[in-house]
Image: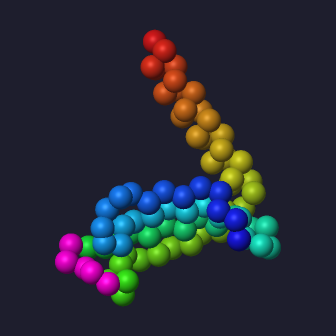
């Protein structure tokens, strides 16, 4: 498995995370974990984890959506 992108905020314990990975079989998965709830202090208490397989055509749509959004943000900043 190869990580493409990951984000974990600097919160403790057991913060939420997002991870985009290409598995050895070529499939791409998006894994998301919700953060621990207040008062949770063990890995058994961390949030739920969901892994979604993203088909190649959806990855293309995701890339296009991000490009459009970034372009729009840049246009707003540039005036």
Residue 40 among those drawn in magenta: yes
User: Of helix, strand and loop, which mostly describes the magenta segment?
Assistant: loop
Tell me the residue at 55%/63% (across/down). 19
Left or right for 31, reference 25: left
Q: In this rendered view, identify the residue nearer to me: 62 or 43.
A: 43
From this viewpoint, which residue is outermost toward the top?
Answer: 79
Image location of residue 29, percent across then percent down = 64, 66
Q: In this view, does 75 lie to the left or right of 22?
A: left
- The quarter of the picture where residue 30 lies is bottom right
Quick check: 66 above or below 44?
Answer: above
Name the residue: 36% across, 72% down: 14
Above or below residue 25? Residue 2 is above
Q: Give the range drawn in magenta.
A: 38-42
Residue placed most toward the observer, 21 or 69: 21
The image position of residue 11, as x and y in percent, is: 31, 62
- Quadrant where the N terminus sits is bottom right
Residue reaching furthest to the right: 25
Residue 41, image x, y percentages: 27, 81
Residue 44's image quarter? bottom left
């Amino acid at each position: 498995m190869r990580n493409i992108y990951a984000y974990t905020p600097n919160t403790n314990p057991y913060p939420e995370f997002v991870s985009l990975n290409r598995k050895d079989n070529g499939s791409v998965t998006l894994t998301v974990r919700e953060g621990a709830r207040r008062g949770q202090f063990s890995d058994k208490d961390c949030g739920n984890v969901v892994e979604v397989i993203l088909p190649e055509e959806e990855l293309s749509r995701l890339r296009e959506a991000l490009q459009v959004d970034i372009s729009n943000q840049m246009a707003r900043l540039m005036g």
